Image: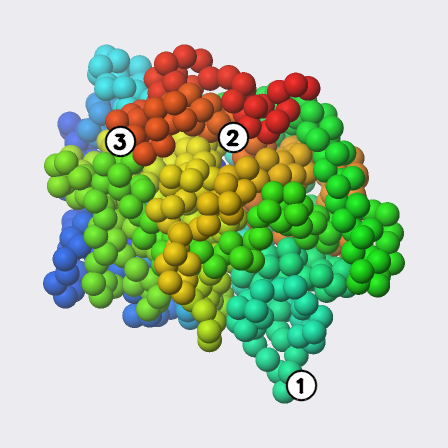
Amino acid sequence: MWVSSFFLVVFLALGNCFPQNKDSEVFIVDPVPVGINEQDGQSNADVQVTPITRTERDYTGVLSDYDFREWNVERMQSEAARIMRMMNTTYDQVAWVPKDKVNYDNTLKPLIDLDGEVQWQYGVVSFAKNVAESPELRDASTAVGKEISNLSTDLGTRKDVFSVVKAFAETKEAEDLNPEQKRYLADYLRGGKRGGLELSDEKLDQLKTLKKKLSDLGTDFRRCLSEDTSFFWIDEAELDGVPEDVIDSMDVDEEGKRKVTTKYPHYRPVIRYAKIPKTRLTMETIYQMRCLEENTPRIEEMVKLRHKKAVLLGYPDHASYVLEEKMAKKPANVKKFLLDLKYKLQKLWTSEKQNMLKLKETEAKELGFEFDGKINKEDFWYYNNLIAKNDYNVDSAKLKEYFPLDTVVKGMLKIYQTLLGLKFTEIENPEKWHDEVSLHRVQDARSGETLGYFYMDLFPREGKYGHAAMWDLQSGSLDRHGRRQAAVAAMVCNFPRPSATTPSLMEHKQVKTLFHEFGHVMHGIVSRTNISSFFGTNVEGDFVEAPSQMLENWVWEEESLKLMSGHYKDGSPIPADLLSALSKSKKANVGGASLRQIFFGTYDITLHTSKEVDSMAVSRDIFEDVLGMERINGTNIGANLGHLVGYDAGYYGYMWSLVFAADMFDTRFKKEGIMNPATGMDYRNMILGPGGSKDATEMLQNFLGREPNQDAFLREKGIEQF
């Protein structure tokens, strides 16, 4: 999962921000509120920059201090207050420009610069809540994040600033802007309508109130999931089938029972390997009940408020408002896309389900449990795994012995370096938020230019963000003086910790997750836009996953798999038969697995084309319709699907972007070679490099040499005949 950049302040959609990442600084930016000289319309002072004293280090260009262990609540509050002063001052300065004196330097450039400076400065305040060890600091990060988000909402509804920008847009100078500047201006003006600046003052106040409520609800919703500590105790015998290294990683109480948490390193192997149905049911129930009481009312209130906000702005529903800026454009297009795929995939799923039922019936006799003739929610991944093992000879438990995390990471880095023409160097003893975090420099292999840096935080901790995601912490765009900054990204994951007897061993699915998220990291490093708002992953929301989804293909190809695998005991390669079986298993149960994504997308678009919902009932009905299965009583996906905040009305994008991912891989890499540096450089320059400075459709056409189509996607899923 990619996590969006914090578009803050101008944000191009004026006030539609959700603070999810960015950073702080090695410079204190202290704007002096001196205003505009009314005689010539020029600012009579620049923002004053004072360097923070710090020790020498060999990674100049990382502008922020990410050693959260050295931060306290007071410092975070002070940083947030300073950032908000800078935001207010810049907006005041633009508002004071006389309409007959407007020009690029006193109108648009200050807003572009503010975007860039806040983008890299705000990360310490925003990012800390996801990774800081101190609960007090995480709480402070959440609290000041709300304050800054609320201020962004207020600034985004300032008609005086908008009127100045509109005045500039009508000048001759605006016609002569470069393409990126023109795109920024056009997006800003469109954002004026979306931000409510064409509303009456009374309605604008209503909009501002709605946005602030939504921001607070969204922050609390995600925080509940990040800090959830749900678990259960169970006798070790009831974990029969779960790999020993996973069991060894679980805490033990005085009675010898094991503590099973809902974090991925426990949830995934238990739900996939535990032979006892009751154990899987307990696991799935506890997992699906995370934040049930807290987040159910929150998501239902957010649906109401999002609908009210959309109607206030002149849209029929929230989905219509969101999709205006996506490739899909309209809810009807999304619903048709999901419905068409649902019918095609259900034909595959019918056959897959019968195979699962046969396995379950056989196991019921062998293990002595009652066969109920159904595939239940807690059965899905278990029998999916068994089919891969039985039908494709993929022994997942055996396979992961060949994927020790260190080996996978080293191989992955080698692949990306070769493919994208890069050189990675690990920094010794960097400033960081935890001892397990690493920092790496990224250079262009040919020129030696430092493009940026990335952090890797791979193991679970209490209070840490609970899934896998990438944050664009600092964009490699131009600063206010026209100098290109180094890009900085962070990859935060939750892979299994080493046990007492084995290193961290990864399931193949986790290898895929790692490769996918690092694809986002590369998108956030090698981009070469001038304006921060278009840098890296700041592309259309239903295209943002496509670049990384395309790169997932490398974890299925024998050539690349050999580079990132080796038995944890002796480094021996994956046996040829197991490697071949793994590659063939890519289509195993693709119908059911894809229908799960159709369910999530359909649930999301249904919520956000509704005025109000019973989120639990909607979830139950759609799950039954799409997968023909019952959800577990008392659970609600609406309470723990984190994508409903940030990806609201956008979950369909995962499947939508897979169409483009399949087309790119099949058309170029499959034909020209998956380790072909020339093809990789085309990918870097045509898909990753432009960021959001071009429309996704234009970038795809440049890379493919034609219009994109669904042919490769349908072949990959095995549904081209339907």
> Could you say which disc has been placed on residue 51 in the image?
none
Q: Which residue is mark 1?
A: 255
Spot occupied by residue 172 in the image (x, y as percentages of width and height)? 23, 12
Label 1 is placed on what type of residue? Glu
**Mark 1 falls on what kind of element?**
loop
Label 2 is placed on what type of residue? Leu
Which of pointers 3 and 1 lies earlier in the amino acid sequence? 1
Q: Which residue is mark 2?
A: 658
Report, in whole angstroms, how far the alpha carbon at label 3 lies from the one at label 1: 57 Å
**Mark 2 falls on what kind of element?**
helix
Q: Which residue is mark 3?
A: 677
Q: Is residue 362 left or right of residue 678?
A: right
Which of pointers 3 and 2 lies earlier in the amino acid sequence? 2
The residue located at (54%, 61%) in the rendering is: 265
Spot occupied by residue 150 in the image (x, y as percentages of width and height)? 46, 47
Spot occupied by residue 232 in the image (x, y as percentages of width and height)? 67, 71
Label 3 is placed on what type of residue? Pro
Q: Is residue 606 left or right of residue 13?
A: right
Front residue of 9/367: it is: 367
How crowded is the residue under tag 1: few (<14 C-alpha within 10 Å), some, or many (20+)? Answer: few
Whether residues under marks 1 and 2 lie with C-beta atoms below 8 angstroms apart, the answer is no
Colouring style? rainbow
